[in-house]
Image (cartoon, rainbow, N blue to C red):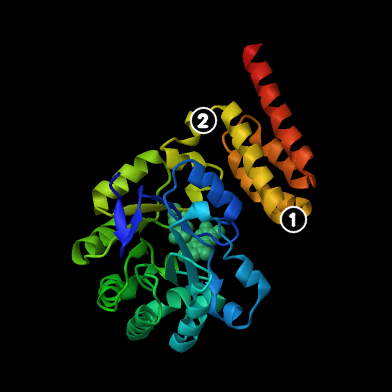
């Protein structure tokens, strides 16, 4: 089978990737998405300082299973030498790739020059990639936005700097930092980057349904497509199915599997609390979803959540049959 693209020498089979999403793209959710055809894993972003301060919670975010390879660890930081030191440490944990986050829009982070804040300082981006690509054995990649704001859309300059300093791939969220997650993603800009660099480009932003996957590929020529919010509660998008095409019986099975992965990974109490934000997305579009959502959000045990959903679906089926 021919890979869809290579990250330096690492083959990636398939072109659909779950976006790194803090609080969502953890091991349990990535496992579910992999089942449906997601082609590689990105961990949730971690901070350079968390690694250098040996913070246990930070290291926990780098958990992955061998079946997830290729796995990308994503890190953010604003200091080139500290980033090198932190990346050397995490490289020893065995990722296939290390990615530098240049898209995080959170004020506390971007305002201090990390995440999207790095886009304001392209020469620092160059130094970071120059040093990292020499210090690490694994390929180094970057995930960028189009610039800080509409007046400083420097994506082309940053993309060239990444390529010239040894980056092996660029993922592009087609919005500026000042857009946060709103407004239209600019696929023309992603197309422009794809035309001008030789390394693989992943397109991201405004992929809301299966049809959008083909649309962004055609529009931009990108090598892969990253799906973020639209995959929460709808991992079937990696199987090229929209949520409306998935029968309730299938939804129940996957909700159960996802919940079991959460319990196994986090333990019962934390697993249930963290699962609630997924399950309220799984039920979108179901009859009386608002009422069901309210019950789920009050429920503190796994059996309770599961019973609420299965009896809700049973009721829907009875009503439909009557
Ligand atoms: C809750 C949430 C958490 C996110 N966390 C990260 C992250 O850890 N690293 C990152 O590069 N992007 C992060 N993003 C941005 C997404 O990866 C993606 O670029 C963005 O949501 C646009 O894609 P979408 O329109 O498909 O959601 C996050 C987005 C959301 C909604």
| Left or right of residue 266, residue 75 in this image | left
- What is the CA distance from the residue labelled 2 to the residue labelled 1? 28 Å
Residue 33 horizontal/vertical position (percent): 51, 46
Q: Does the rendering let one see residue 310?
A: yes
For mark 1, give the secondary structure.
Answer: helix
For mark 2, give the secondary structure.
Answer: loop
| Left or right of residue 168, residue 263 in this image | right
Residue at point 19% right, 61% down?
195
Residue at point 36% right, 44% down?
212
Q: Residues within 10 Å of mark 1 (few under 14, many from 20)?
A: few
Closest to the observer, 208 or 301? 301
Residue 270's disc is 1
Specify which label sits upstream in the sequence, 2 or 1. Answer: 2
Residue 55's disc is none
Q: Does the rendering let one see residue 181?
A: no
Residue behind mark 2: 246
- The answer to the question of whether label 2 and label 1 lie on touching residues, with beta carbons closer than 8 A, is no
Q: Residues within 10 Å of mark 2 (few under 14, many from 20)?
A: few
Say if 225 sits above or below 233 in the image.
Answer: below
Residue 126 horizontal/vertical position (percent): 32, 82
Residue at point 36% right, 81% down?
125
Closest to the observer, 248 or 256? 256
Residue found at the very far left of the displayed protein: 195
Give the quarter of the figure containing the N terminus: top left
Residue 77 horizontal/vertical position (percent): 49, 79
Identify the image quadrant of residue 168: bottom left
């Amino acid at each position: 089978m021919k890979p869809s693209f290579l990250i330096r020498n690492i083959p990636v089979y398939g072109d659909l990737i779950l976006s790194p999403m803090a609080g969502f793209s953890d091991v349990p959710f990535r496992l579910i998405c992999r089942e449906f055809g997601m082609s590689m894993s990105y961990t949730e972003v971690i901070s350079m300082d968390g690694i250098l301060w040996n913070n246990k919670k930070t290291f926990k975010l780098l958990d992955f299973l061998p079946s997830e390879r290729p796995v990308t660890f994503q890190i953010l930081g604003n200091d080139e030498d500290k980033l090198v030191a932190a990346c050397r440490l995490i490289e020893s944990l065995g990722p296939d790739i290390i990615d530098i986050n240049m898209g995080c829009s959170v004020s506390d982070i971007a305002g201090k020059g990390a995440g999207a804040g790095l886009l304001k300082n392209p020469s620092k981006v160059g130094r970071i990639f120059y040093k990292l690509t020499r210090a690490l054995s694994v390929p180094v990649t970057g995930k960028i936005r189009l610039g800080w704001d509409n007046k400083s859309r420097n994506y082309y300059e940053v993309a060239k700097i990444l390529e010239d300093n040894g980056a092996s791939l660029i993922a592009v969220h087609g919005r500026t930092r000042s857009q946060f997650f709103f407004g239209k993603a600019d696929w023309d800009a992603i197309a422009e980057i794809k035309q001008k660099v030789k390394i693989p480009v992943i397109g991201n932003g405004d992929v809301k349904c299966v049809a959008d996957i083909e649309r962004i590929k055609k529009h931009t020529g990108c090598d892969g497509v990253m799906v973020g919010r639209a995959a929460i509660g709808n991992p079937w998008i990696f199987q090229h199915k929209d949520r409306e095409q998935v029968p309730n019986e299938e939804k129940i099975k996957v909700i159960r599997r996802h919940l079991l992965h959460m319990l196994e990974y986090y333990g019962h109490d934390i697993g249930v609390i963290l699962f609630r934000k997924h399950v309220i997305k799984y039920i979108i579009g179901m009859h009386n979803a608002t009422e069901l959502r309210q019950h789920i959000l009050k429920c503190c045990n796994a059996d309770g959540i599961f019973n609420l959903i299965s009896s809700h679906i049973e009721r829907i089926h009875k009503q439909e049959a009557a």
